[in-house]
Each structure stands twice: as C-alpha cells, then as structure tokens.
Amino acid sequence: MKLLRIALALALSAIALPARAADLMPLFDAHMHYNWEPTPRYSLPEILALFKASGVTGVLATSRPNDGTRALVDAKPEGLWVVPFIRPYNVRADIGTWFNDQRTIRLIRTEFERGYYRGIGEFHIYGQSAATDWVKEIVGFAAEKGLFLHAHADDEAVEILFGHDARTRMIWAHTGFSTAPEKVAAYLQRWPDLWCELSYRSGITEGGRLTAEWRALFERFPGRFLLGSDTWTNGRWESYAEIMAGYRVWLEQLPRPIAEQIAFRTAEKLFR
C-alpha cells in the first residue's frame, strides 16, 4: 500500500512537471520531518525516491524523535544534502510541555554532542510561553554554539525569542501562517538574522498567480525566504510531489535570480 501511494505521488509529479528531475531547478526543503512517532512511517528508500523525483537536492531535517534525522544523516544519501536540526520532542505530546521542562535542555545538549547539528527545532511556541527560563536557556545555548532556531511561533513569541539574545538566528516556520506582509517586511528589516519558511503560508498566490504584496516582499528581500514541505503526517508525504511542484508554479513567475535564491541559494549561504 505504501508503494502504491508513492507511485501515485510520482505519477502526479510527472503530470505537473513533465521535465525530468535532472532538468529541474534544485529545491531545498527547509521544513522536513522524518517522524518515527507515531507509526507507520515511510521507508528511507521511499522518501529518498520522492526527493529525487521532485528535484529536491537538500533538506533541513527535524524529526520526532531525533532518530529519523539521525537515520538520514547516517545514510549519507547520494545526491541529497542533509542539514540536521535537534528537535526538542520525543512524542507529539511534548509540543505542549517542552518549554517548561528541564529535560528539554538535557535532550538538546546530549544530541548536540553528536557534532553535526546546525540548529534547534522545529519547536512550537506561542506568546508568553517563550519567556520561560528554560526557553531563555535554550536560546542562549543556540547562540553560544552558533545554532539556528527553527520556530513555529506567533508574532509575540518571535519578538520574545529575539529579545533573549542579540545573537539569535531564526528560521520562522510558516512565516506566521497569516501575519500581514507589511509586518513580515518590518520584521525582516528589524532582524537581519530572521529567515522566513513558507510551508502552509497563506496569501502568496491568488488564482495561481503571485500577489502583488508577496512579489514585492520577494523582490525586496530575495535572500530571506526558504521553501518547505512540513511532512508532519503521512498525508503530507503522499502529497509531497504536488507540494514541491506547487512552489515551482510561482517561482517561475519571478526573475530567475530571485527564484533561485528562494529555491536553494539562500539555504546554501546559510548552511554550507
């Protein structure tokens, strides 16, 4: 059944993208979960095949628990650049407690000792939950070690996180989902070390065309945006080829240099 669903996704990809994967502009998936909890999950060869068919040549891997990310790193997959982040969860219920739990910093420090992680997250944080002592310690640890934060956060939490340490570097998952474009622009102007990831982000297109507001944002801040799939459920894996093909539709509406910045060059600048 799994292979059947993968085959269907690849078929949809072929319909949307008639060119061979090798001919496609590379994409970096900056929000990818290879979760091992809950089961069932897709096999490593299956997801590697999806990446290849979709023209994805790099991923920011963040998984629950971190076993999935370690599996990707250890596999050293040919043609795929893996950028591992430490996720502060072991099970889904940790989403609501990690920011108030001293075990979280121990988990992060233990994983960090593996020597290859580039950031912490994706983590979910809202409002004053970002102000706890444990979150402040985690932000300080990230700044000290040169790690990025990958924050699924509302506007208030983003401001609190940056207030914890002036050295903070953050990837904002979903770009706030619906935060007004003018506010996104103000944040990018205010914090040079903020980058916006676009999975699930509303308002970018209307009727398949880029809106004027988002075109202006991309043209003003071409090096500050990243793409993502957010494969948090099996359903997102089943739709993976369509999700990544959807980005290509509006990337093609931008000048090639700007499209390349968003598609993969910003990730190369940040993580290479």
Image (spheres, rainbow, N blue to C red):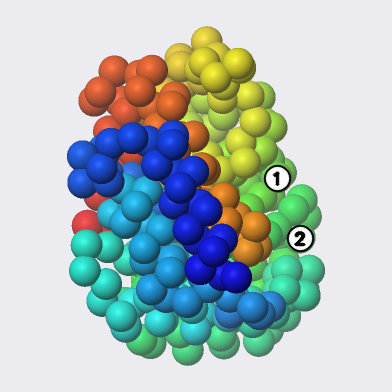
Q: Secondary structure at mark 1?
A: loop
Q: Is residue 195 visible?
A: no
| Residue type (three-letter) at the residue carrying disc 2 | Ser
Location of residue 146 in the rendering, given as x and y in whole percent from the top left corner: 35, 64
Which one is closest to the eye, mark 2 or mark 1? 1
Q: Residue at x 66, y 80 (%)?
A: 39
- The residue that label 1 is drawn on is 154
Q: Residue at x 56, y 70 (%)?
A: 2
Q: Residues within 10 Å of mark 2 (few under 14, many from 20)?
A: some
**192 sits to left or right of 66:** left
Q: Secondary structure at mark 2?
A: helix
Q: Is residue 107 visible?
A: yes
Q: Residue at x 40, y 42 (%)?
A: 14
**177 sits to left or right of 237:** right
Q: Residue at x 70, y 58 (%)?
A: 125
Q: Quadrant of the C terminus?
A: bottom left
Residue 92, relative to residue 233: is it above or below? below
Q: Quadrant of the N terminus?
A: bottom right
Q: Residues within 10 Å of mark 1 (few under 14, many from 20)?
A: many
Location of residue 112 in the rendering, given as x and y in whole percent from the top left corner: 41, 81
